[in-house]
Each structure stands twice: as C-alpha cells, then as structure tokens.
Image (tube, rainbow, N blue to C red):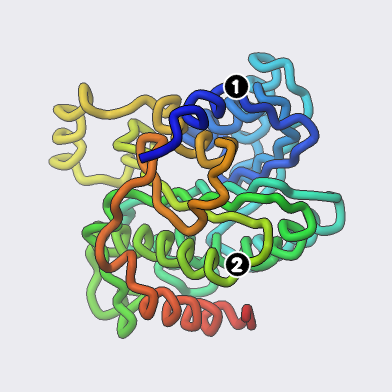
Amino acid sequence: MGDNRAHEEWKTARLDGKTVIITGANAGIGKETTKDLAKRGAHIIMACRDTEKGDAAAKEIIEETGNSNIVVKKLNLADTKSIREFAEQINNEQQQVNILINNAGVMMCPYLKTEDGFELQFGVNHLGHFLLTYLLIDLLKRSSPARIINVSSMVHKMGTIQFDDLNSEKSYSSMKAYGQSKLANILFTRELARKLEGTSVSVFALHPGMVRTELARHLNPVIRFGLVLLRPFTKSPENGAQTTNYCAVAPGLEKETGQYFSDCDRATCSAAACNDETAKKLWEVSCQMLEIDWQ
C-alpha cells in the first residue's frame, strides 16, 4: 500500500517552526498526539472545552517533552459562539497554522443538543469541526503546505446520513447517531479535498483503532462489559494516536489527499463514505445549518 521509506521516515520527522491546533487535546488520543508532536518541536495550541484539564495536561506534556511552546485555549465545539471566538483569536494571533487536527468527539451519549439545537454527536463531531475548519481555512491556505486531519472511526460503516432527520428528532439511537457523525467526517474530508485541489492543503480522515479512552463513559453497562472482554484487542491511547501522527507528518502524503487511513496506511471505507453526491449534499446542508456560505 504505502511507501516503505515514508513509513520509516515519518517516525523521525520534525515539526520545528510549525504550528499545530489539536481539538480535544487534554485527554485520550488528543493528549497522546499533543505529546508526540511536541517531541517533534511543534508549537501546539491545545483547544479544550475544559481549560483546567487542558492546563494540567499541558504542564505534564511540557515536563515530559521539554517543549514549552504549548498553549491551551478554550473551545467548546457544542457552541458555535465559542468556535467563532476561538477562531477569531487564532486568526488575530497566529501568523500560521500548518496542521489542524479535528480530534475531539463525543461518543454514544444520551440524547442531548448543542447550544444551537443540533443533536450533540452530529453537532460536535461533524458540524463543530466543519465550522472550525471553515473559519481557519484562509489561514491554513496562507500557511501551506498545510494539513487537515479529521479523526473518524470504523463505526462510520454502521452510519447513514439521515437527511430527513439529521438531528435525530424523529428517532434516536446513540450508536446510529455516532455512526452518522463519523461517516460525515469522511464525506467532509472527501469534499474538502476536492474543493482544495490546486492549493497545498491536504486533508485526511482516519480510524484510530479501538482505543481505551474516556469516550466510552456513556456506554450502557452491557456494552461496557463487552469492551472489558475486548480489552486485550484494544489499543492504548498512545497506540491509537499513531495514525493521527502519521497523517500529520508522513512525507509525500499530499498525493493521498481526501483518503481514509487506519494503522498508518490507506484503508477501505464504506461505499456510503465514497459517495460524492452525498458528500456534496452534506456540504450544502451543513452550510445551511451553520448559516455560512462556503463555496
């Protein structure tokens, strides 16, 4: 599949002088990604809903990596006002953003809505990151070569885009809503890559693996017990962050823009995730829901 040389080279790739934004950077995969990219010399902006937890994680990472060029900023992806405030700060303060990692997510939670009335999983996992990327895209283009990385999941294979009920108001299944949001991540990646053709901004989606993180906290006890049984086959957050790190730094990956990765290599996504018509329609509907015009 991939180029073996690139496969080895990425492990030692440096990011000195590069600026990286990571959403949900204070725990799980986000924290491990922050740690890895900090070791590579990057200037990292940890975008966190809970800045207290963010500050504690940053302190720990600075001590471990010796890279003090790490800042924590508040970002609540369940509130478009917070997303706009965060993006405005970044656009005003940063000369460049070379890598945007849309990592934060909620998973299989009870039925809840965002501040703007979107179903929480679709609102945070897809619409929140869609809006954030839109607000930072000009800065990313000016910082090119740049990369955008959308953390999806193999659970996208269980998802369909319910255009007649995107907010799950007619019926709600936490698993189906999660699958829909993760499928949306890949469709967004495809359409964004198409729109960015001719620029030096690449976009990748990925499945981190079955990772042991706090995301599982909302699962019902039966499923949680199942996960305990599966524990020997699951990844630590550190291993789960590997594919994100690979997409962030692997040399020569630009030609794979728009693609889906797993285990540091190209992977096969569902037929629904490869549907360009659905991707276009989702883009248009997302813009309408967020009241933005992103051509």
In terms of sequence position, does the residue under pointer 2 or pointer 1 come before the other? Answer: 1
Quarter of the picture holding the C terminus: bottom right
The amino acid beneath tag 1 is Thr
The amino acid beneath tag 2 is Glu
Find residue 12 and name its label.
Answer: 1
Quick one: label 2, few (<14), some, or many (20+) residues within 10 Å? Answer: few
Residue 21, quarter of picture: top right
Is 11 situated above or below 43? above
Q: Residue at x 30, y 55 (%)?
A: 269
Q: Nearer the viewer, residue 276 or 109?
A: 276
Find residue 20 and name its label.
Answer: none
Quick one: label 1, few (<14), some, or many (20+) residues within 10 Å? Answer: few
SS label for mark 1: helix
Point out residue 280 in the picture as x, y percentages from the top left corner.
45, 79
Reading the image, the residue beneath label 2 is 197
Q: Residue at x 32, y 40 (%)?
A: 216
Is 30 situated above or below 168? above
Asked if residue 144 lies left or right of residue 261, the reply is right
Quarter of the picture holding the N terminus: top left
Point out residue 210 in the picture as x, y percentages from the top left corner.
29, 36
Point out residue 11 in the picture as x, y percentages from the top left corner.
54, 24
Residue 59, quarter of picture: top right
Quick check: marks 2 and 1 in contact, CB under 8 Å? no
SS label for mark 2: loop
Q: Nearer the viewer, residue 237 or 206?
A: 206
